[in-house]
Image (cartoon, rainbow, N blue to C red):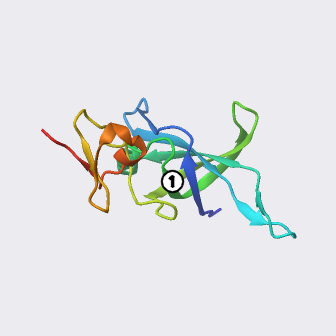
Amino acid sequence: MLCTIVIEGRLTSSAETGTTREGREYTQFQLIHRDRYRDHNGRWVEAKAMFFDVMTWGDLAARVRNLTRGDQVVVEGGHLMPYLNDSGLPTLKLSAKNVSVSMRFTNAHAGPPTRQRRGDVVTTPDGERYAADVYPEIATDRELVHHTR
C-alpha cells in the first residue's frame, strides 16, 4: 500500500536524537496541527488538535536535530500508525521522507535562537539602538542583534 501525507505543524518539544542497536541514527519529534475554519456565522473556530509523532532516519535525522519547540515545519511522510499517546489523545506516528521549515507565519529559522550576551545591541529598522536585554522578544531576531566587544 502506498501512502504519502503532508502536514504542517509546530513542534511540541525539541527534537530528540538517538541511535539504534545497529548504530543507525534517528531523530524524533512531536508535531501539533491545529486547523481553523469559519462557522456558518462567519466566526473562526479552532478544530480539534491533531498530534503526529515524526521519526527521521540517517542524513535527514542529522539535518533536523536542531529543530526546537515552537518551530513550524512541513513534513512529508508515510507509514502511518495510529495510537493513543501518554495523555490518551489520538496520535499518528509517521516516518518522514522530507522535513522543511515553514515560512507561512514567520521567517525561516531552525535550531536554538542566538543567545544574547551582555553588551549586545539591537538596531531597529528605523536605526534606533537599544540594549538587547531591554527587548528580549526582538533580541531573538538574528537579523537585528549586533554583538559588541
Q: Nearer the viewer, residue 68 or 113?
A: 113
Pinpoint residue 84: horizontal percent, then vertical percent.
73, 37
Residue nearer the viewer, 27 or 21: 27
> Which residue does the numbered mark 1 point to in the structure image?
72
Quadrant (top left, top right, bottom left, bottom right) of the N terminus: bottom right
Residue type, label 1: Gln
**Which residue, as the protein is rendered here, is positioned at the far left?**
149
Badge 1 crowding class, 10 Å Cα cut-off, few under 14, some 14 to 19, many 20 or more, is many
Q: Residue at x 76, y 51 (%)?
A: 48
Q: Quadrant of residue 132?
A: top left
Element on which disc 1 rests: strand
In the picture provided, is 26 more to the left or to the right than 119? right
Q: Can you say whether 78 is above or below 122 in the image?
A: below
Residue 137, horizontal then vertical, whole percent: 42, 45
Residue at the image position 57 percent from the left and 41 percent from the top: 12
On screen, residue 14 versus residue 1, left or right, reads left
In this image, 51 relative to 134: left or right? right
Q: Give the residue at the far right of this rendering.
A: 40
Say which quarter of the image contains residue 46: bottom right
Note whether 2 is above or below 53 in the view shown: below
Quadrant where the image shows the C terminus: top left
